[in-house]
Image: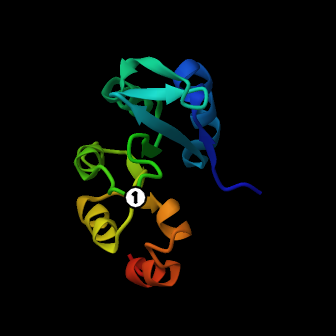
Amino acid sequence: GASRVILGTAAVTDPAFTAQAVAQYGEKIAVGADLKDGKVAIKGWLETSQDSWETFFDRMQALGVRTVICTDISRDGAEQGTNLDLYRELAGIEGLDITASGGVSSIEELRELQTIGTKAAILGKALYTGRLDLKTVIEEVEGC
């Protein structure tokens, strides 16, 4: 009954597995890319990939991945704003739907993420602390 599975470390360490999963399940496979110092963090953020995030995203696109959930670790939970420059760049990658995560803390940022073309955003600490109100957020993005 699951509508989607997110591959994290496996997408970095076992691209053949990722390719097989995408071939078999198509858009039900998403990839989680947690970025740290220009690379993809793996194994619970304890290690980083050898390749740059750009190389990783190119590889995922070539494997047929359609959705990438991308977290800027440096912004995650900090409530100091999300990395709009990063998401602007990622949203420009043809054929990938990007979910922005990490530091989203204002309605203005959500509006900008919509404008630049990200497909979704993950909210965390800003909801827990009350900086963002869930009802207001839903009203803001409803119908988009």
- Residue at x 58% of width, y 19% of height: 14
Q: How many marks?
A: 1
Circle 1 sits in a helix, a strand or a loop, which is it? loop
Mark 1 residue type: Glu
Question: In terms of image quadrants, where is residue 25?
Answer: top right
- Residue at x 30% of width, y 61% of height: 113
Q: Which one is in front, 27 or 45? A: 45
The image shows residue 123 at horizontal and vertical percentages of 49, 62
Residue bearing the label numbered 1? 79
Colouring used for the render: rainbow
The image shows residue 82 at horizontal and vertical percentages of 33, 54
Instruction: Using residue 41 as the reference point, say whether residue 3 is left or right of it.
Output: right
The image shows residue 96 at horizontal and vertical percentages of 38, 45
Label 1 packing within 10 angstroms: few (<14), some (14-19), many (20+) = some
Residue 50 sits above or below residue 141 on the image: above
Assign the N terminus to one quadrant of the image.
bottom right
